[in-house]
Amino acid sequence: MKNTEIPEIYSIKKTSKETLAKWYHLMTVGRNIDDRAPNYLKQAIGWSYHAPYAGHDGIQLAIGQNFVKSKDHLFPYYRDMLTALSAGMTSEELILNGISKATDPGTGGRHMSNHFAKPEWNIHNTSSLTGNHTLHAVGVARAIKYYGDDAIAISSQGESSVSEGYVYEAINGADKEKLPVIFVFQDNGYGISVPKKDQTANRKVANNFVGFKNIKIIHCNGKDVFDSMNAMAEARKIIQEQGGPVIVQANCVRLHSHSNSDRHDLYRSEAERTYVQEYDPFAKFRRLLVRYKRFTEEELDAMDEAGLKEVKAAHKLAMKAPDPSPDSIYDFVLPEPYKAEKYPDGTHNEEGEKKKFITALNETLKAEFRQNEDTFLWGQDVAHKDKGGIFNVTKGLQKEFGKKRIFNAPIAEDFIVGTANGMSRYHEKIRIVIEGAEFADYFWPAMEQYVDSSHDYWRTNGKFTPNVTIRLASGGYIGGGLYHSQNIEGSLAAIPGVRIVYPSFADDAAGLLRTAIRSRGMTMFMEPKALYQDPKAATVIPDDFEVPFGKARIRREGTDLSIITYGNTTHMSLDAAEMLEKEGFNVEVIDLRSLVPLDKDMIISSIKKTNRALVVHEDKVHGGFGGEVASIIMEEAFEYLDSPVRRVGSTFTPVGFNRILEKAILPDTGRIYSEALNLLKY
């Protein structure tokens, strides 16, 4: 859709003087702060990162004016200062963010400056990973559509960020699902120093999407207030009347360097820099107001003075605001989980029919979806009426709960995780379960969103946490080889802000899954797929069984050696303990169940009793989670040890496909027995 096709709602002649005055005031205040921001850094006050918006004035004013606070959802990017101001944030709030004060409404000083947000108004805090919030906008738009709201999601970004693969995933998903989201591309021709011609073949990046079936594309002059206002109004109208999504491509100019750490004179000629100054949108708007006699020069001068006074007053207030306290760094890493009251230690003594691991997962999912109608599940290959994922864990869910709650996602792992993050932003009651990838090894494309989601709670100073459970079929012993048999929990455990659980038995799988779904925050739920149908993992499962996070389980009492393990190797460790019992040794086997948080108390208590420790897991010894466990034992229970702490795990190689190679790589009962015997005889 070209500019000429946009119905004229706003113009210099038709727009009321009151509205024009409001816009001019916002633009005056915004420019004043934009120009002052670098001085804070020079004075060592803060604002160490500032990306000036000058040259984007028209489109940013229009985005903010078309945002309905506490109803719509706005995802600004780091250059969106005027957008945030136009959306309702105050001068003081912008400066509080810039100088990283504790009272910054978006992050409390935890996130870098120029990331303006007010979560209580649905002005969302986005990361500095440029463009990744498109996925969040799509996710919340999915919730808007599902719940029948007439709101919209607005994602704003620079044109160069559209080169990111996850942006294509977001737009593809929004197009497929016909979601009410506006993607605004603020095109100033540069990605830092990289010109647009090095980013994309199309002169207008929005035209990369002309082949998409449902999306509408609007081109506008982002330097012009009226063209931008009309474009945003038309985009909203299209969504209201036809459904979304819409791309608004706004042609802008960048008057200054990319940021205060950039020097554009190194890659832009003096002629170009002079040329863009002539297209200053704010100066043009001022000239129009005078030329068409909407205001006199004197009236505008008075408004300029009023804007300057407002910014000076805001500066004084912001400077008096408290700084973040060093003692607060541990606040909001993880929200408090659901409290398991019926089974506070995550154990039971019930008797009856044993159920397999896969049955435990399937039945628990169904029970939780019945219990909370605001629970959703999606992933790859999870929603056929006669099939549920490659292993049939989700079989029957779509049949019972419908296609709107259980559905397939594109083969795009980042999209799966990112839209879960976004949808959970719509309402605290929503709980989302995703199959992050069909095998854990395929999860790596989603790491961008995993890392971003992991610090949402901390980054927003406790104002938002994604309530998402990520299920992954993990581990080997199935002859799967590369991308089908690896373990990744050792890598994930180094990232704060996500719980990681790894059950070994059916009852713990049910109890941990129930706790994960009911809890606030994000949980990585690792499933040892070799145990899905294994009779060894089958147990009695009480109705409504719950297992708290951070609570290990003693699977075998002992006095001579502690084997600390989880997942597939729990069963091998139990078998090895049985073999050692025949030789007169009494071995204790602790099933961790939960890696993050970790039950250090039970580990240390066991070491005090047995004085020996063997840490066993399927993952590689090198860099595996067992190294963390061994370190804790050495640091906190060293005086109780009668022997070194040893580890058993896989070799420092990928897991091979041929069964001979797999056997040589992965740990087994024999290796555990041998290493345990060495420790017992030490």
Image (tube, rainbow, N blue to C red):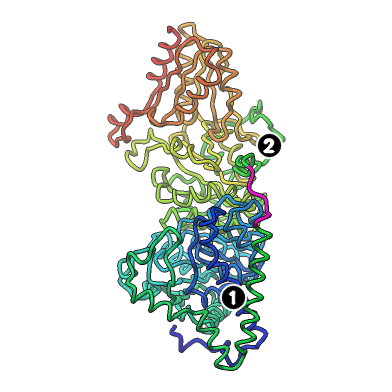
Q: Residue at x 46, y 74 (%)?
A: 215
Closer to us: 264 or 76: 264
* Image x and y of residue 169, in percent: 42, 61
Q: What element carries label 1?
A: helix
Q: Residues within 10 Å of mark 1 (few under 14, many from 20)?
A: many
Q: Residue at x 57, y 16 (%)?
A: 557
Image-quadrant location for residue 117:
bottom right
Residue 386 at least partly seen: no
Residue type at mark 2 is: Ala
* Image x and y of residue 664, in percent: 30, 26
* Image x and y of residue 547, in percent: 63, 34
Q: Is residue 160 magenta?
A: no
Real-space Cα separation, disc 1 to disc 2, in angstroms:
55 Å
Residue 28 numbered mark, or none: 1
In the rendered image, which residue does mark 2 sit on?
Answer: 340
Which quarter shows the C terminus? top left
Which quarter shows the N terminus? bottom left
The segment highlighted magenta reads: 319-325
